[in-house]
Image (tube, coloured by chain):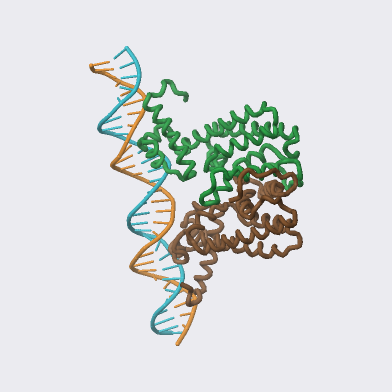
Chain colours: A green, B brown, C orange, D cyan
DNA sequence: CAATAACCGGACCAGGCGGTCAACTTGTTA
DNA sequence: TAACAAGTTGACCGCCTGGTCCGGTTATTG
């Protein structure tokens, strides 16, 4: 399973530019991005793509894994921040900024297939859960909110802006602020449905 | 342009079941729903679909037009409701319940092509704007929120639940409540970006 | 500098898509 | 009921997609 020999120099180079190209292409066209376009953008042949990743889903999984990984890293570091409320807001800001266009649909699209993605996703739920717990104990978020709630709402700010044909690049900050206000204890109304 | 003779009886029947089947299929599979599947579901031939709607986009536009139309109707009636805050919440509840799965992406996907959809969309912006204005004057929503904000956030409650592989059918109510709390004046923090 | 294994790439394949069309069926009407 | 316009249909078309494969190339290594 694990790689025995180090990657050849050109192969490593190609793999890198492939991942970069795929990330951009997925960001622009969502899951519909075509392998041919990705290969063209990376300046390599289509066959090379499938040599590095046997399936389009595997390629997507690699990118998603990287994104969730840095999300987990950032979240983990913010767990020791002085102000838990500000830490949660900072985490959400980072998450929204990182996620360019393609929304969190990989959570179920890819997640149900690739075990590594499942593991990373579960760690993300734990990390966000811890962030939310700390913020709640600190009185920064309302009592009835859970980590799962925040994970689900995490990508909404960026996503809603995509309904505009040419959204201002920082507009998501506005909707993150609105949603975050909805998470605060001040003026909170009881919620009609239990958290999943 | 306008139809000179009334539709034949069987044709009218087919058109109806076609629209119903297309709505369900679009709801389940999003924009990727195939004409063949829709035709099969409606119990008619693929050619018949194209006789009623020359293009897949036209079919989608017809459904979208219907949805936006009832949205405008409901919104218009709620404009005379006694409690403007409750009226806005009721409107958002209706919108979230109506929109099953396929999110509001038609706002730009189809909207830029079909002039009727553009007109209906503009009326929706006006209607929602009026609802929001009334609610704001009544102190039910914060001062810095606009109708456009609400239109963009309108479909978020249902959308975020789709990240779960098997979401409870009423879970969106929870996130609508959270977002609506974010729209209230109590505990509102200033917003970092102007409304589009 | 060979020799070789790893790597590359684009022609190729099957399948599914939106859309067309000509032969056939059926509701309407006088 | 006869005759015709309107409606239906599924085979078909061109195109694009994810994925395969093998002849040619290239980095590595003794």
Q: Is residue A154 above or below residue B137?
A: above
Instruction: Give the quarter of the image for residue B95.
Output: bottom right
Residue sitting nearer the eye, A59 or A155: A155
The answer to whether one can see residue A116 in this image is: yes
Q: Is residue B135 above or below residue D22?
A: below
Q: Is residue B141 left or right of residue B116?
A: right
**Residue at the image position 45 percent from the left and 34 percent from the top:** A20
Exactly how many numbered labels are in the figure? 0
Residue sitting nearer the eye, A133 or B150: B150
Q: Position of residue D26 (x, y in %)?
A: 30, 26
The answer to whether one can see residue B163 in this image is: no
**Residue at the image position 65 percent from the left and 36 percent from the top:** A89
Q: Position of residue B4 (x, y in %)?
A: 47, 77
**Residue at the image position 73 percent from the left and 36 percent from the top:** A140
Q: Position of residue B54 (x, y in %)?
A: 44, 64
Q: Position of residue A132 (x, y in %)?
A: 69, 34
Q: Is residue C26 left or right of residue C14?
A: right
């Amino acid at each position: 399973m694990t790689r025995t020999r180090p990657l050849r120099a050109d192969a490593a180079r190609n793999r890198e530019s492939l991942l970069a190209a795929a990330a951009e292409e997925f960001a622009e066209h969502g899951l519909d991005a075509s392998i041919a376009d990705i290969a063209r953008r990376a300046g390599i042949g289509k066959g090379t793509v499938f040599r590095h990743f046997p399936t389009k889903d595997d390629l997507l999984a690699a990118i998603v894994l990287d994104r969730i990984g840095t999300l987990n890293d950032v979240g983990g570091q913010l767990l020791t921040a002085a102000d838990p409320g500000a830490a949660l807001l900072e985490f959400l800001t980072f998450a929204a900024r990182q996620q360019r266009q393609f929304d969190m649909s990989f959570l179920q699209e890819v997640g149900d297939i690739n075990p590594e993605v499942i593991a990373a996703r579960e760690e993300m739920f734990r990390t966000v859960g811890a962030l939310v717990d700390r913020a709640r104990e600190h009185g920064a978020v309302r009592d009835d909110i859970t980590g799962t709630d925040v994970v689900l709402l995490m990508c909404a700010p960026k996503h809603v802006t995509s309904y505009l044909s040419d959204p201002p690049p920082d507009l998501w900050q506005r909707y993150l602020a609105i949603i975050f206000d909805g998470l605060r204890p001040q003026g909170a109304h009881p919620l009609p449905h239990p958290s999943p």
